[in-house]
Amino acid sequence: VYDPTYNTADPQLTWEIVDEKPVLAAFHSDNRNMVLGCVSAKDGAMGSTLYMLHTGKSDVQGQVREEDAVLVHAQYTSSGKIVAVFDSFAALYNTKGEQLARYDFGGQGLMALDVAEARVALVFGSQTQDTATVLVLNEEMEPLLRKSFENRSTPKVLVGKAGVWVLTGHEVLSWSASGKAGESIVVESRPFTLVRGGEPLALVNGKAMPISGLLDKLAEAGSNGLADSSAPLPPSQPASAPASADVSDDDSVEDSSSVLPDGISEELSGSTPEAAP
């Protein structure tokens, strides 16, 4: 780890990795603590190791090994804990490597994920399935919402305090933090991905298109005391078995309206607006 001047003669941290392949590294907001994720094979099965390091110390501050699990993503939360997503479960760890909470995927295939605002958004399904499921967890790995949608291609997901947005094919879907379906939009050119700028954005034809307006009407309802508060799902949907079969038909996505929601760029109707910052 180097300082901003890239002084190779005096690195802030040097850590030798032996018999493992590093796959990711993430820094805490203090720019001192970091988590290093590695994978390696043992007895014919892949496993993952998280090393908690500090740039001013030579010793490992914490370490955790998860067998039969491939690390996909890891990052610090605002509270200084570490959220790690593997191919078969998601977990919360402290800086000593102790597991504080866990959510098992129950055999479901992970297609997409996003972590932000003390929320973990996961999309389950496969290319051969017509329906996929988006699940949002809080920092304690408790399910907040679970919704099914039509799986038109490899989905993308973006999560925030206001809710969750899913890109599937040419359509962007939305749900509020309380699980209420927001508006959806369909664009002629398939969006490349969803990104978190100053606000949620969809990248379309090299342009950044705001999508936060999909939840505007629900936000207005919430300001009038009509929206539900965000709370974990009932115990009848256990964290250890997030089965998509529990999703009712009412959760499925309805056909999109051709009317553009408030706050959505006119690019949807074929014009080319200025790129968002």
Image (cartoon, rainbow, N blue to C red):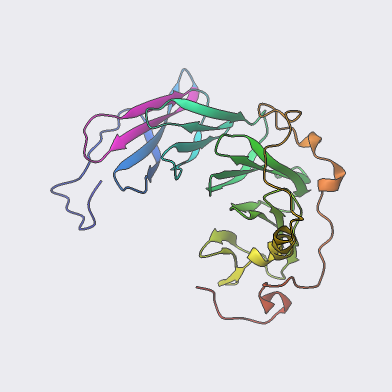
Q: Does the magenta stretch include residue 63?
A: yes
Residue at image point 21% right, 55% down: 6
Q: Position of residue 2 (x, y in %)?
A: 23, 49
Left or right of residue 135: residue 251: right
Residue 1, placed above or below residue 71: below
Give the residue at the far left of this rendering. Answer: 9
Dominant secondary structure (helix, strand or loop) of the stretch shown in magenta = strand
How many circles with numbers are drawn on the protein?
0
Q: Position of residue 271 (x, y in %)?
A: 67, 82
Is residue 204 visible in the rendered image? The answer is no
Residue 193, placed above or below residue 107: below
Q: Position of residue 250 (x, y in %)?
A: 85, 47
**Depth check: 144 or 50 in front?**
144
Give the residue at the far top of this rendering. Answer: 43
Is residue 89 visible in the rendered image? The answer is yes
Left or right of residue 22: residue 44: right
**Depth check: 208 or 182 in front?**
182
**Depth check: 219 or 51 in front?**
219
Q: Give the range drawn in magenta.
A: 45-66
Give the residue at the far right of this rendering. Answer: 249
Residue at image point 29% right, 29% down: 60
Q: Quadrant of residue 215?
A: bottom right
Residue at image point 50% right, 27% down: 100
Residue 45, placed above or below residue 36: above
Residue at image point 19% right, 46% down: 11
Give the residue at the far front of this rendering. Answer: 225
Residue 34, placed above or below residue 188: above
Q: Position of residue 249 (x, y in %)?
A: 86, 44
Q: Does the magenta stretch include residue 20?
A: no
Left or right of residue 26: residue 218: right
**Depth check: 119 or 124 in front?**
119
